Amino acid sequence: MSETAIRIQGIHHRYGRKAVLCGVDLEVPVGSVTVLLGTNGAGKTTLLRLALGALRPGGGRVEVHGLDVLRHTRVVREQVGYVPDAPDAPGWMTLRDLCRFLAAHYPTWDQRHADGLAGQLGVPTRTRLDRMSKGEGMKAMLVAALAPRPRTLLLDEPFGGLDPLARGAVLAGVFSALRDEGTTVLVSTHELDVAARLAERVAILAGGRIARAGTVAEVLGQDEPARVPEALEAALAESVAADAGGHP
């Protein structure tokens, strides 16, 4: 049995009176690329932030590389890279500023790696973040997340705002390197064609629970590359419909 990088057990979370996650169970194997699918508002961002230890669940437990994220938050964050769905660094910072700030907090920070990624992805290093395009901002966050060479990477809709060329560079270059280094990746996205190109494993979040999870072949019943995007769309629609049928 493969080692588990992220283990989520019975996680509950609510915002006010609204329950968003209702007993989520999910295991992400070490070195895998797992795509988290769900409709807008399904709780994908919440689940990633819980895995980072940035939110406290209403119930349940999250472990990353065997460590409880609430008891060992600092150690976990040193091992986990996180790219939010929108840049969350102060707008006045440049990528150089951001790197200088973060380097002091990560023992494994590799500035040469950051510089190489910035060049590969075409990220300006002396432009303020609030003056970057949305795509440039997302790529800057990706550089910052990868610079410490994390064991695990959490990506929340990382392709929003990326033009096709930039998206291709990320997919072909960055993810290839991550696979070579054995980095575990959990990525949420609504872009099914991208999910089909990335996913080794799929988890579908619907009705506050993981409706389906496993390898692409296990979840879809087939793994023919040309048919994976439409099969993912069908699987997501079926999971959402099943939840709606159970919750009139």
Image: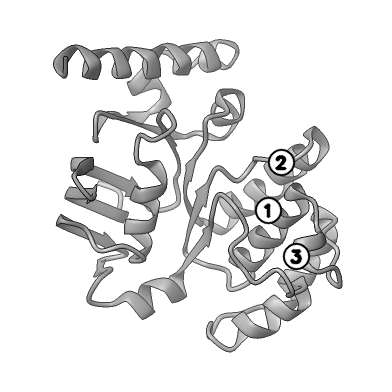
Q: Earlier in the sequence, mark 3 or mark 1?
A: 3
Q: Which residue is mark 3?
A: 129
What x and y, as percent, mark residue 158? 60, 46
User: Residue at horizontal 19%, vertical 49%?
Assistant: 11
* Residue occupying the far bottom of the picture: 104
Q: Position of residue 114 (x, y in %)?
A: 72, 70
- Tell me which colouring the rendered structure shows: one colour
Quickly name the residue at label 1.
Answer: 138
Q: Amino acid at mark 3?
A: Leu
User: Decide: marks 2, 1 in contact (CB < 8 A)?
Assistant: yes
Looking at the image, residue 152 sits to the left or right of residue 91; the answer is left
In front: 56, or 181? 56
**Residue type of the residue flagged with mark 1:** Met
Earlier-in-chain disc, 2 versus 3: 3
What amino acid does circle 2 point to? Answer: Gly
User: In the visual, does 180 lie left or right of 9?
Assistant: right
- Considering the numbered disc 1 on the image, is that residue within a helix, a strand or a loop? helix
User: Which of 231 and 182 lies nearest the eye of the viewer?
Assistant: 231
Q: Would you name the residue on which mark 2 appears?
A: 161
On the image, the x and y values in percent for residue 116 come to 79, 66
For the residues labelled 2 and 1, the Cα–Cα distance comes to 8 Å
